[in-house]
Image (cartoon, rainbow, N blue to C red):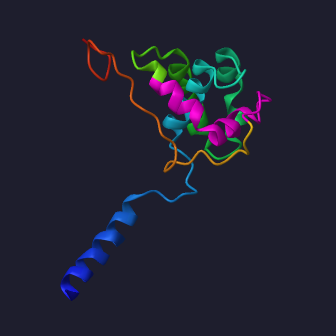
Amino acid sequence: MKRIAALLLLSLSLAGCALPPPDQPAYFSRMGRFMGLIANCGCSDITSARMLADYPAAVNGRYSEAEVKAMKGYVDLGNIERWDNRAVICAEVCGQRCMVQAVVGPLGGRDTGVPACLVSERDLHLSDGIKFDGGADGRD
């Protein structure tokens, strides 16, 4: 019994190490895609062009200058995604209202009705795009 309890405690402690800390901002590429999808999906009144032009104001110093520069390509890609499961992706993105507010608030976008929260690596959920006739990456 003691051995089982010890193994269980060890398993739980190792599983806890696998999760990123709750206050770690989302990885810059995922954050860029998220911002592009906010505009693409219409989660706010921020247009795709405005998101691409003003996205650095939304990240508010949480990323290095190099990451912010590299983020632009991911914002652009999120802006133009047209996957077959777009409705699922957009529902997921727009449903993360406190994170959407964290992005659109600093840009002066339409309020989501909830307070902003950190767009954290642990809590940000982004489904992969699927092209039903060609696989998850969209290539045939």
Q: Quadrant of residue 116?
A: top right
Across and down, in percent, residue 37 comes to: 56, 25
Image quadrant for the C terminus?
top left
Vertical arrangement, residue 127 with respect to residue 130, above or below: below
Image side of residue 53 versus residue 3, left or right: right
Q: Residue furthest right?
A: 108
Q: Residue at x 59, y 44 (%)?
A: 119
Dominant secondary-structure state across the stretch colored magenta: helix
The reply to whether residue 70 is in sight is no
The reply to whether residue 116 is in sight is yes
Q: Residue furthest bottom?
A: 2
Vertical arrangement, residue 8 with respect to residue 47, above or below: below
Q: Is residue 23 magenta?
A: no
Q: Residue at x 53, y 39 (%)?
A: 28
Vertical arrangement, residue 70 with respect to residue 62, above or below: above
Across and down, in percent, residue 114 comes to: 72, 42
Vertical arrangement, residue 14 with respect to residue 7, above or below: above
Q: Residue at x 54, y 57 (%)?
A: 22
Which residue occupies the foreground of this view, 26 or 69?
A: 26
Which residue occupies the foreground of this view, 100 or 56?
A: 100
Q: Is residue 102 magenta?
A: yes
Q: Residue at x 50, y 60 (%)?
A: 21
Image quadrant for the N terminus?
bottom left
Magenta segment range? 88-112
